[in-house]
Amino acid sequence: MSEGLLELARTVGLEAAAFVKASRPAGRVEVADTKSSPTDVVTQIDRASEELIRARIKSARPDDGFVGEEGADLIGTSGIDWVVDPIDGTVNFVYGIPTYAVSIAARQDGVVVVGYVVNIASGAEWGAIRGAGSWRYEGSERITLAAPAVARVDHALVATGFNYVPEVRTKQAEAMARFLPHIRDIRRTGSAALDLCGLAEGHFDAYVEQGLKEWDLAAGGLVASESGLLLSGLDGVPNERLVMVAHPSIAEEYFALVRACGF
């Protein structure tokens, strides 16, 4: 069944990515609304992309549930729920920075079993099936991903992001000031889904972020874990409070560092 779910996620994801790309005007995109703060933005294209994804999935699988960033959740009866971010990296999308993605995951009885992410601007695609690995797509070919081992935490390049709520961001900045002397450097791309796929590719060595919603983490998190990386939270389960990712070669030391710095 997982292959069928992934095939649907990819088909719908590519259609949504093409829609978003074709709909984006030249220059900056008009902001339609805000969410957690005045800098946490939504566009009409976000909403239209989610409506498209929801309609296609419900047409193919009418008994499934649906959890999206921009609309009301739908309760299903099949045991399958879809967790969707129609544009992950909306601020990048608004400004025309080419790092924003469609992210689609399928959960079975609450466990993510399939993940698909496509960079809308570049067309790069990733997929994963729980227990079967993760890969980058090259046309119809799947290039299996195996995240590289990391020799030392102090040489690690760490992907991260910051909350849009000023009070939370202030605390994150304080933790980051303690953290930075112990690693190589940080990178902040603006899309959690693409960061997690980048970890699987070896573009980064580790990851830390607070405030991720389930649609930010579901698909990219499966791509990362199926490439051999370990995901953790403050008390073991990655969640909105804290997400940490690292290769097993440094995970214990890295996770301890993140906690000690006060994230």
Image (tube, helix red, strand yellow):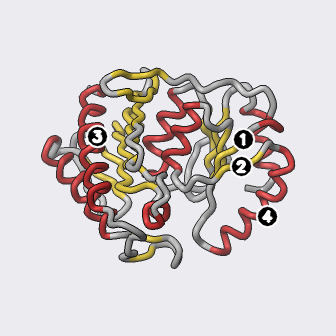
Does residue 81 appear left or right of residue 115 in this picture? left
Distance of label 2 from label 4 (alpha carbons)? 15 Å
* The N terminus - image quarter: top left
Q: CA distance from mark 1 to mark 4?
A: 19 Å
Contact between marks 1 and 2 (CB within 8 A): the answer is yes
User: Hey, which quadrant is residue 210 in on the image?
Assistant: bottom right
In the rendered structure, which amino acid carries the disc numbered 1?
Leu
Q: CA distance from mark 1 to mark 3?
A: 36 Å
> Does residue 187 appear left or right of residue 11 in this picture?
right
Which residue is labeled 4 in the image? 174
Percent coordinates x, y for residue 212 in the rendering? 54, 55
Camera-near label (1 vs 4) is 1
Disc 1 or 3, which lies upstream in sequence? Answer: 3
Closer to viewer: mark 1 or mark 3: 1
Residue 235 x/y as whole percent: 66, 45
Please report contact status of discs 4 and 3: CB closer than 8 Å, yes or no: no
Q: Position of residue 69 (x, y in %)?
A: 38, 60
For label 2, count other residues whose C-alpha is less than 10 Å away and answer few (under 14), some (14-19) or many (20+).
many
Q: Amino acid at mark 4?
A: Glu
Q: Earlier in the sequence, mark 1 or mark 2?
A: 1
Identify residue for label 1: 157
The amino acid at mark 3 is: Ile
Question: In screen coordinates, is 252 left or right of 37?
Answer: right
Judging by the rendered image, the residue that carries numbered circle 2 is 186
Closer to the eye: label 4 or 3: 4
Which disc number belongs to residue 80? 3
Could you say whether the residue bearing mark 2 is in a helix, strand or loop?
Answer: strand
**Residue type at tag 2:** Ile
Residue drawn at (43%, 61%) of the image: 93
